[in-house]
Amino acid sequence: MKKYDSAVQLIDTHCHVIHMIDKSSIQAFSNNEIQEIRKILHQAALKNVTHMIEIGTTRIDSALALEIAKLFEQVSAVVGMHPHEAQRDYHKDLDYIKKLLASHNQKIVGVGECGLDKHYPGYNITAQIDLFKAHIELALEYNKALVVHTRDAQDETYAVLEQYKQDLTRVVIHCYSNDLQFAQAVTSWGWFLGIGGTITYPKNNLLRDIVKTIGIEHIVLETDAPFLPPQTIRGKKNSPDHTSTIAEFVAHITDRSLEHVALVSTRNAKKLFNLEQLA
């Protein structure tokens, strides 16, 4: 790996460290679990990844995301529910998410990941839309970034987001997989595209073309660890330190320096999640 200037920093804007350590219950972290997390953060720091956003997908994930953020200065939390949670009665869990936000803990920097997902059979798109809108309203009420998940539901996602384009100012489309027209629309609204390991996949020419067309001024970097590893470790667990792998790849395809990609994507991440206080 090319050596970074020591002043350059990277931010992993979307990861699931709790899934890296197989934590699935709302209990205090054990000493072993804390050491596992510390090791993950240390490995990331060695690759100049100085901050991470831990993302909730359920009530339990969200609670644990906040606990990790409380334990480690270099972690912030996003709380919310994945669209798959709309397949059951989600209202009590949504009330719990509201309580987390109402605590006004400064370590919570966003709402999500939320959105629409029609990839697997049996989805209830009406319930998903209702849950998605509830998250959007929470992001607006508490002035938090919105982290959007959309899979095989571009038109429906666009229809919902367009209703809020005048009000929402800090939004990222996580794991971007839609078309160029969608990308141009949301970036024209001042929002960001989350770019991760999928950009390195040999068949993903569309995403590479989109990034080259819209420019790095409209992207943030993410790993979605332990999911969606870059091509170099395909088949293995992903980790936040591979934010650097993604940065290198983006620099290569856009013909920009690695340092420039790092500086711009980090600036974007700080704006998105209101992290300007970070050194």
Image (cartoon, rainbow, N blue to C red):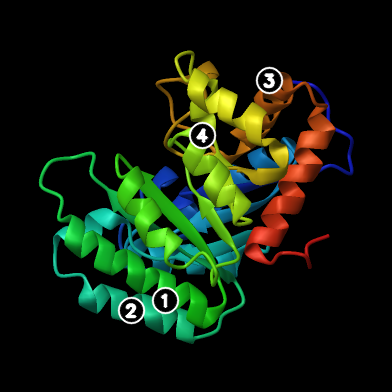
Residue tagged by mark 4?
Answer: 180
> Relative to residue 163, is residue 117 depicted above or below?
above
Of labels 4 and 3, the one closer to you: 4
Residue type at the position of mark 2? Tyr
Residue tagged by mark 2?
Answer: 96
Residue type at the position of mark 3? Ile
Residue for point 36% across, 61% down? 160
* Residue 184 falls in image quadrant: top right
Asked if the residues shown at circle 4 and circle 2 are in contact, with their CB atoms under 8 angstroms apart, the answer is no
Neighbour class for label 3 at 10 Å: few (<14), some, many (≥20)?
some
> Relative to residue 274, is residue 210 depicted above or below?
above
Name the spot of residue 75 as percent of width and height, x first. Answer: 61, 59
Residue type at the position of mark 1? Glu
Of labels 2 and 1, the one closer to you: 1
Residue type at the position of mark 4? Leu
Of labels 4 and 2, the one closer to you: 4
Residue tagged by mark 1?
Answer: 137
**Disc 3 or 1, which lies upstream in sequence?**
1
**Disc 4 or 2, which lies upstream in sequence?**
2
